[in-house]
Image (spheres, rainbow, N blue to C red):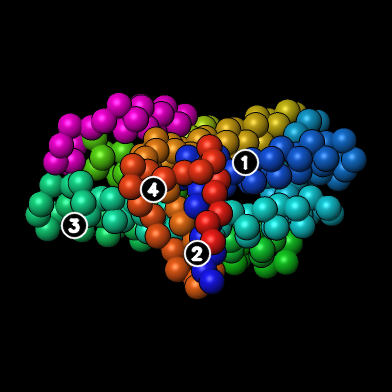
Amino acid sequence: MVSHIQLKFPTLAVYTVLLPLASFVFCVLWSVLFHFERATFTHCQVRNYLPSISAAIGSFSPQRYIWQICVAIHSAPRYLVVGMYYTHLCDVLLTGALWNYLALLIFLLQATEVTSLLGLTFVSSSENFHVHELCFITFMVSALSNMLLLYLTMKHGTKHRLTVPKRLSLKYKFIFGMVNITSFFLAVYFYFRHNWYCEPVVYTFFAFFEYIVVVTNMGYHVTAFWDFSDHVVTVSSCCSLSITPKQHTKFAMNDFVIKVA
């Protein structure tokens, strides 16, 4: 007897993003409400109203454990999406060595982004600063590079005219990508300004733009909702996984069905 679990990909995409988003919001709010003095403390000892992300998710309990659990759970479907994008790009991009290399490069960047996120989640800056710093730098470089390359490749390198969902995906990829990149450089600016001049509230601006970077990164990745809007993920009890266009699968329920054969 083999059991099959089928889930529409858009549903999976939403649940996958909600895990880190909900845990991130919880960690920040909990740190502000119950660990405000320690979470907002900096070496400059100036007025500050928001904790940095590393302080909010890595320095206190239960925030640290909730963030780690949610990131760990969400990483499995993230790796699945990495493979889906590679297969999708190989199918839809123009023929030629350049486009094949771009598809492979995007695959490597996306896999690196997920892996480095796990690294900076489970190795805090207080435990091993150098490893945490390396994971953070790797995460940002791979994330920003992926945002740029995936958008440009899907916009200019596809064989056929994009469908309405995929055009919507590109639109939001551009919006989230631009906001993410802008917020990242603003966060860097306020971080160094805080360390150089120790002005009040400057670190708060740094933390705020850090939050925007995180949220827009999640927003960028949830655009897979439209890229694979017609796909269904099927998992069977014999450890097989398949992803097929929705029109080839019959559903007994709206979003979720279990079939036993």
Residue type pointed to by label 3? Asn
Give amino acid for label 1. Answer: Leu
Q: In the image, which residues are magenta?
A: 156-179
Q: Nearer the viewer, mark 1 or mark 4?
A: 4
Between 104 and 242, the one lying in front of the other is 242
Pointer 4 or 3: first along the chain? 3
Is disc 3 surrounded by few (<14), some (14 to 19) or many (20+) residues within 10 Å? some
* Labelled disc at residue 214: none
Q: Count neighbours of disc 2 (C-alpha within 10 A) and say few if under 14, some if 14 to 19, many if 20 or more.
A: few
**Which numbered marker is on residue 18?**
1
| Residue at image point 35% right, 52% down | 244
Q: Are marks 1 and 4 in contact (CB under 8 Å)?
A: no
Residue 100: which disc? 3
Q: Alpha-carbon neighbours of circle 1 within 10 Å: few (<14), some, or many (≥20)? A: some
Instruction: Please name the amino acid that badge 2 sits on.
Output: Ala
Closer to the eye: label 4 or 3:
4
Query: Of residues 85 and 125, which is closer to you in this image?
Result: 85
What secondary structure is the stretch in magenta mostly built from?
helix
Q: Do labels 4 and 2 touch, CB within 8 Å? A: no
Q: Secondary structure at mark 1?
A: helix
Q: Please report contact status of discs 3 and 2: CB closer than 8 Å, yes or no.
A: no
Residue at point 41% right, 29% down? Answer: 172
